[in-house]
Amino acid sequence: MTPQKTGLFIGEDGKNLAFTFVLVSSLFLLWGVCNGMIDTMDKHFQDELGLTKSQSASVQFAHYLGYFLMSIPAGWLASKLGYKGGIIAGLLLVAAGGFWFVPATHINSLVHEGRVTANMAFVAFLAGVCIIATGLTFLETIANPYTTVLGNKRFAATRINLAQSCNGVGWILGPIIGSRFFYSKDAAGHSTGSQTLYIPYVSIAIAVIVLAAIFFFARVPDIKSEDDYHLDDSTPNVSHSIWSHPHFVLAVVAQFLYVAAQAGIFSFFINYMTTETPAIPSAWNSALNNAGGGSGMIHDWLSGWFETGKNGALALSNAGAANLASIGSLCFLIGRFTGAGLLRRIAPHKMLGLYGLANVFVTLLISLKLGWLSVICVFLSYFFMSIMFPTIFALGIFGLGARAKRASAFIVMAIMGGALLPKLMGYVADISDMSRGFFVPMVCFIFVAYYGFNWAKLAKTETSTGMPAVASH
């Protein structure tokens, strides 16, 4: 093989696919931003529409419902349209959902006039969330495997990890954008979030239309991936049902519970930080104000981090907590990078078991209300969740050969857990408090740890070497 064909982005035909890879990586950034913004919306609707925590968790329900409904149809349609057609279709759906927030915001304004109910306005917003999620399903279904074929096969894992870093950056930016528009206030200190919530979504809609046009004119070759396992589904007297493999069946369950835990922790992060953190020392507020130079845009941003609580003590504001969510996402991103290095030395199923057990421990400490130690543990939970989605995915499809594509669709559908379990977490928080709500993800992590430690027995193998690279969520 000539040196020309061994590059990171050099295809088998010798052509450079770097620009195509950059375009596809922008999709990872896009859905990272959208997912990060979703996780800052719950508290906004609780305050603006008077919803309970359990009711506001319908944001996650609508988001993950879009994934659940479209995962298999998206895979089928993408196979018909090809990579380019599938990506463009997904982008146009995201744009439609983004523009829908304009009429949804208008409907919300009618609540104050008594012309519509708060629930009707909430449903209008949920419709936009669900439409965007259906578009993101197309993008994730296509972009994840496509990165692995945009160059020499040897560097497939390197390319997908590079793309994942863009996704991680999006998770960091999403909460910052959400804090700016969902929790904005006017000069009198009154919330203006209901009037500005549509702005980031319309901006995303415009951006993705431009991106769709670029994809339309760009070279996006429809490269076919190879079957690395060479398993023959036509072998007689052999069961070819993916449901006959316990390591796959329990991977579906583990993924359902992991995404449930992730969605719950992410969506109630602001609630936890604004209600369960100890009183903020006044010196912190002064230090942040001084760090901003006493005036200007940075000062105004920093001064909005704190507010006087109901008991008269200084507490985190919704905007401040939303900004802290970006730090949580940074912990998540650091966990991905360090986890990738550790996975080269530690068997993936053992790593999953250890990280699952670690999260059982930290969520227990959060539930016990141990002050700042519990607050730190919330950020640690982000770190230990980082490797779970891709690792469960890889362990679940291990050894399935040509059947792995079919199995992948069901594992993607398992993220429906993110739609259901946060409502239970919100219910527990409503009847008790937000700290006790963390018992729900703790139970989820117990099963994830169990699956990791028992995977070798379930898969009837001693090693997971050779698992295909997969994308994270």
Image (cartoon, rainbow, N blue to C red):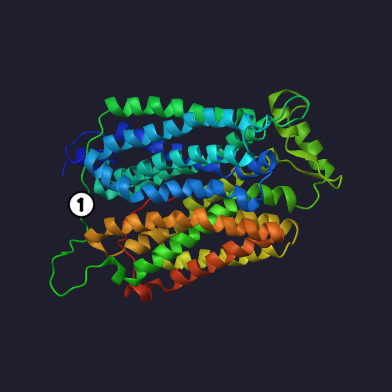
Q: Position of residue 77 (x, y in %)?
A: 27, 43
Q: Position of residue 397 (x, y in %)?
A: 32, 61
Q: Is residue 459 visible?
A: yes
Q: Is residue 311 left or right of residue 133?
A: right
Crowding around mark 1 (Cα neighbors within 10 Å: few <14, some 14 to 19, many 20+) is: few
Amino acid carrying label 1: it is Glu
Q: Position of residue 432 (x, y in %)?
A: 72, 61
Going 32% across and 51% down the picture, which residue do you hit?
72
State the image quarter where residue 96 is shown: top left
Q: Quarter holding the N terminus? A: top left
Residue that badge 1 annotates? 226
Going 33% across and 26% down the picture, which residue do you hit?
214
Nearest the eye: 101 or 409: 101
As drawn, which residue projects farthest toward the right?
A: 312
Element assignment for label 1: loop
As drawn, which residue projects farthest toward the front?
A: 115
Nearest the eye: 113 or 4: 113
Nearest the eye: 391 or 184: 184
Q: How many marks?
A: 1
Going 78% across and 26% down the picture, which residue do you hit?
188
Q: Is residue 387 left or right of residue 182?
A: left
Q: Is residue 302 left or right of residue 195?
A: right
Q: Is residue 150 left or right of residue 249?
A: left
Residue 198 against residue 409 in the figure, above or below: above
Q: Position of residue 83 (x, y in %)?
A: 27, 39
Q: Is residue 348 visible?
A: no
